[in-house]
Image (tube, rainbow, N blue to C red):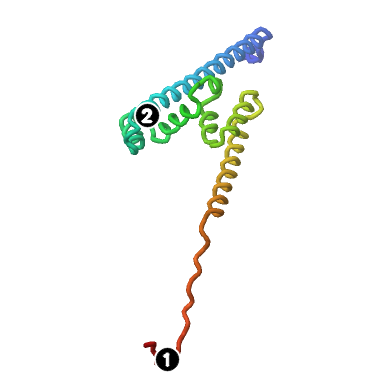
Amino acid sequence: MTATALSPSPNSDRAYVRLRRDIEAVLITGRAKVEAAWVGTYHETGRLIHEHVLKAKARADYGAKLLERLSTDTDVSVRTLRECEQFYRLFPIRRPVAELGWNNCRLLCQVGDEEARARLLADLKRGDLPTVQLKERVRALNAAAREEQEEAELATAPAPLRLLRPRRGTPDLYRI
C-alpha cells in the first residue's frame, strides 16, 4: 500500500465526522428510549403488584409470600419486585420521574423523607445532580435518619435496672 492510500482525504474526514455524529445521535436516542421503557415497565409492574396486594389486604402475610412466589415463577428477584412496588407506591403518577433512569428512581425510593426526596428529584430534573452525587446524598440522608432513629430509641429506652449486690452475713447464724 502506498502512503497516499493510508492518509484520509478531506472528503472522507467530513464523511467520518458525519457518520460519528449520526451514530452518537442514534445511540443516545436509543439509550434514552430503553431507559424510559425500563422506568415504564417497572412502574407498571409495581402498580400491578400494589393493586393485587391491596385486594388481598385481609391476609397480612400475603404480600411477602406473593413476591416469593412471583419471583420463582417469573425469574425476577424478590428485591426487584419489591423495588417495583415501592416505586409505584412512592410515585403513583409516573410523570414526575418519567425522564429519569431506573437507577435514579431506585435511589430516590430509598429516601424515606418525602421533602428530601422531592428536593433530590428537583435537583435531578434541573441536571444539577449526577448519579454518583445522588448516591452519596442518599447514603448520607439514610445514615442521618438511622442516627436519629437510634437516638430516639435510646431516649425512650427504660432506665437500666440496678442489680442487687449480695451481702455476706454472719456464718452459722440463721434467722428464725
Q: Quadrant of residue 124?
A: top right
Left or right: 60 with respect to 124? Answer: left
The image shows residue 156 at horizontal and vertical percentages of 53, 53
Q: Which mark is residue 134?
A: none
Q: Secondary structure at mark 2?
A: helix
In this rendering, the answer to whether 140 lies above or below 45 is below
Q: Residue tagged by mark 2?
A: 54
Location of the C terminus (image quadrant): bottom left
Q: Quadrant of residue 49?
A: top left
Q: Residue tagged by mark 1?
A: 171
In this rendering, the answer to whether 118 lies above or below 166 is above
Location of the N terminus (image quadrant): top right
Q: Disc 1 residue type?
A: Pro
Left or right: 117 with respect to 167? Answer: right
Q: How many marks?
A: 2
Q: Secondary structure at mark 1?
A: loop
How many angstroms separate mark 2 from mark 1 (CA)? 71 Å
Residue at the extreme top: 11
Residue at the image position 48 percent from the left and 74 percent from the top: 164
Q: Disc 2 residue type?
A: Leu
Q: Label 2: how many residues lie within 10 Å, few (<14), some (14-19) or many (20+)?
A: few
Residue at the extreme front: 176
Q: Nearer the viewer, residue 122 or 101?
A: 122
Q: Nearer the viewer, residue 47 or 105?
A: 47
Q: Label 1: how many residues lie within 10 Å, few (<14), some (14-19) or many (20+)?
A: few
The image shows residue 3 at horizontal and vertical percentages of 66, 15
Q: Nearer the viewer, residue 172 or 95?
A: 172
Residue at the image position 55 percent from the left and 36 percent from the top: 111
The image shows residue 145 at horizontal and vertical percentages of 57, 43
Residue at the image position 42 percent from the left and 32 percent from the top: 80
